[in-house]
Image: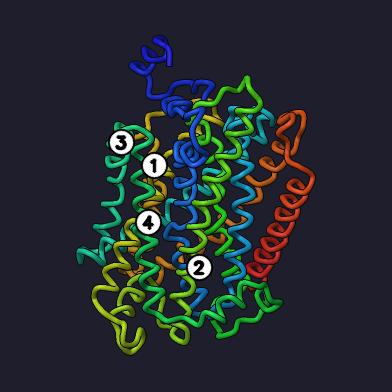
Amino acid sequence: MDNSMNKKTHHSLIEHAGEKSLAEVNGSIEVPKDGSFWRRLLAFSGPGALVAVGYMDPGNWVTSIKGGAAYHYLLLSVILISSLIAMLLQYMAGKLGIVKQEDLAQATGNRTNKFGRYALWIMTELALVATDIAEVVGGAIAMSLLFGWPLLVTIFLTAFDVIILLLLMKFGFRKIEAIVMTLILTILVVFVYLTILSKPDWMAIMGNYVPRPQTLSTESLHGLDNPITLTAGIIGATVMPHNLYLHSSISQTRQVNHEDPAEVKEAIKLMTWDSNIQLTLAFFINSMLLIVGAALFFGHAAELDGFHQLYDALNDHNIAGAIASPVLSTLFALALLASGQNSTITGTLTGEIIMEGFLHFRIPMWLRRVITRGIAITPVLIIAIMYGGNESQMDALIESTQVFLSIALPFSMAPLIYFTSSKKIMGQFANSAWVKWVGWLCFVGLTIINIVLVWQMFAG
């Protein structure tokens, strides 16, 4: 940032954004040009972890565990398909950032008229707020479970996570990636342990990764949530719109010589490996969420209205059986807290990317975080006060946000697929024909699910 830009910040909190996405860290990490493939991949690893965080946030917990408790292993195929779609879309997003040196918000803002730019910005901001609501609820409930504090108090405490993020930013982007990866591994270890103890039916698990006609049946199997609602919720919780903007930006944190097509191609390959490895971890975690829900709580879905009920169920021998213990419930709450904090880091970075890209100006990160978190906390506080801290209402709020994310996703998918499939924009790095058409097929399929969902909501 030049001196004139620095001087300007003394007079106004708002400044015009520079040309680079997340300019403070753009191109800040060196990648060795020689050495083994694994050494270069290690240097390129990190952005995939930040992206994977969005695929295992508290919103996933509600939809996946509830899906398992209500429909046993049936919706595992939805998690598999969602994860494969995620890998495809994140590949496109990372490639856009590396090739064009633009994030998705910049690419969209630079190639649409004023009305389109503002309309897409509003939709994206609403999606980010929906994501933040899930983080607020998940983090607040986790602290309430661990420390016994009133829910209203812990909701307010989630507003101070901006201090943690600002401190982390001072340590450098590589340190943030390491912390995020550590939290992901913590969640993975906890759920591997829970899955092993729950002794699931492995044959049924493998069989239900294959989609079945009843997966999208409009008839409820147990008089609970409609399968198509949970399906949309799982998709919205798994393939999150803000991750496309985030990945297209942080894929640019590695130093790449854009004058050398061979080096750009190598960067895309390393980015794809990093992304797919991390998203595979996210897939296993999401699968285990549903598997634990199915193995431990199938037949008790009506009793599991919220995180608190799940926490209690893990300590209840009548529900969780012989494995029930205070240790299991505490591990569950710790993993939930780690999930919420992880998502907070990536959500704040994405907020800056979206504002800079669509509106071409930026505000200090602390102010951006205060605004976004303030908007997210408001409906959570209203519901907490209206229902006296009833956590089942909180879970219903989370599930609603995940369904909204599913509805919002096509608005981010369409420009991403279009831009990365255009030879005029991407040159030799444009999507191959099969990638382009699979991308559009996913877009059409998700749009149809959303149309059916909205129709059912109004009909109901």
Which residue is label 1 attached to? 177
Which residue is label 4 attached to? 185
Which residue is label 2 attached to? 287
Q: Could you tell me the amino acid type at mark 3?
A: Leu
Q: What residue sits 37% from the left and 46% below the top?
A: 374
CB contact under 8 Å: marks 2 and 4: no
Helix, strand or loop at disc 4? Answer: helix
In 3D space, how far apart are the residues under numbered discs 2 and 4 (Cα atoms)? 15 Å
Label 2 vs 3, first from the N-terminus: 3
Q: Could you tell me the amino acid type at mark 4?
A: Leu
Q: Quadrant of residue 152?
A: bottom left
Depth check, front residue: 290 or 196: 196
Structural crowding at the residue carrying mark 1, measured as other residues with C-alpha within 10 Å and reported as few (<14), some (14–19) or many (≥20): some
Q: What residue sits 43% from the left and 16% below the top?
A: 1
Label 3 vs 1, first from the N-terminus: 3
**Disc 4 or disc 3, which is closer to the eye?**
4
Picture mark count: 4
Q: Would you place residue 63 above or below residue 243 in this image?
A: below
In the picture as drawn, the residue positioned furthest to the front comes out as: 35
Q: Residue 26: give x, y in percent of width and height.
A: 47, 27
In 3D space, how far apart are the residues under numbered discs 1 and 2 (Cα atoms)? 24 Å
Which residue is label 3 attached to? 166
